[in-house]
Image (cartoon, grey):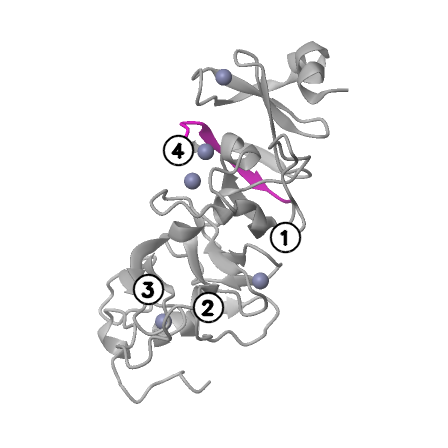
Amino acid sequence: MDALFEAQFSPLADSGRALSKCGKCLRYMKYISTQPSRMYCGTCEEVYYLPQKGTIKLYKELTCPLDNFELLIFSLAGPEGKSFPLCPYCYNSPPFEGIDTLFGATKTSSTGKLGKGAGMPCFLCPHPTCPHSLIAQGVCACPECSGTLVLDPVSAPKWRLYCNMCNCLVYLPQGAHKISTTRDRCPECESTILEVDFNKKTTPLLDGSTLYTGCILCDELLHSLVEMKHGKSFFKRMGSRGRGRGSGRGGFRGRGRGGKWDDPKMSFRDF
Ligand SMILES: [Zn+2]
Ligand SMILES: [Zn+2]
Ligand SMILES: [Zn+2]
Ligand SMILES: [Zn+2]
Ligand SMILES: [Zn+2]
């Protein structure tokens, strides 16, 4: 049965619950949880497929800057399950030319509609200024594949990065109040500089301050606090973020502001 037809006329539409606002009509769309799970806007008579086999929640009533649709958070089950934001509209109609090459085998059909469970979550979105995009949330190249490690925005207090292509997980300093990406890049390795707001009681900063910024690969303090899930070593690779830009050689070390870690002899460079 056609997905739109089914959503309109099956009793499932009645059982679907209002979840997030449509960017076109600004009314609530219904979440239909039966496979294939999808959002349905009864006003626009549109169906938007979702990633399958996980839970879907509203993401802090944040909206996509491209189309005004409210963002959703998708989570896979289990402690190692990824969670990631997505825009129902962009997920189904990736807004950027050539984005389908990022999906590997998955291609849009001739009608431009994506099939079940295939789409562009925010962690694949190349939007330069959207705060949820790969550009904003991507931190560094995955040590295990050609993907990018992105900050899991709802992983507090067990902050972590996950790869947008493989299952690689990197644990960040645990128990931090807040960890966020900044707009700055490490001059040495081009990783995104992270801002960490440590817990007052467990801050590793000598003067008891909590705010710290640095590169998780080049900054000794941050590097000593991150951990790869499978115990493999995690160190920088040139051409981080997989873009093949300059190697950054001869730049300044990406230093945090904590005084304790200023000893220039301390280097994890040759790890
Ligand atoms: Zn609508
Ligand atoms: Zn969107
Ligand atoms: Zn976006
Ligand atoms: Zn990877
Ligand atoms: Zn760096």
Q: Is residue 34 above or below residue 171?
A: above
Stretch in magenta: 64-76
Q: Are marks 1 and 4 in contact (CB under 8 Å)?
A: no
Name the mark on residue 226: 2
Does the beta carbon of the residue at mark 3 sit less than 8 Å from ligand 5? no
Does the beta carbon of the residue at mark 4 sit less than 8 Å from ligand 2? yes
Of mark 2 and mark 3, the one earlier in the sequence is 3
**195 or 64: nearer the viewer:** 64
* Residue at left offset 47%, top offset 21%: 22
Which-is-in-front pick, marks 2 and 4? 4
Residue 162, given in percent of the width and then of the height, sits at: 53, 57
Of mark 1 and mark 3, the one earlier in the sequence is 1
In 3D space, how far apart are the residues under numbered discs 3 and 4 (Cα atoms)? 38 Å
Q: To which residue does mark 1 refer?
A: 104
Residue 33, given in percent of the width and then of the height, sits at: 67, 27
Residue 192, given in percent of the width and then of the height, sits at: 36, 61
In 3D space, how far apart are the residues under numbered discs 2 and 4 (Cα atoms)? 34 Å
In 3D space, how far apart are the residues under numbered discs 1 and 4 (Cα atoms)? 24 Å
Residue 161 seen in the current view? yes
Task: Categorize mark 3 by other alpha carbons within 10 Å: few (<14), some (14-19), many (20+).
Answer: some
* Residue at left offset 63%, top offset 18%: 16
Which-is-in-front pick, marks 2 and 1? 1
Name the mark on residue 203: 3
Secondary structure under the numbered disc 2 in the rendered image: loop
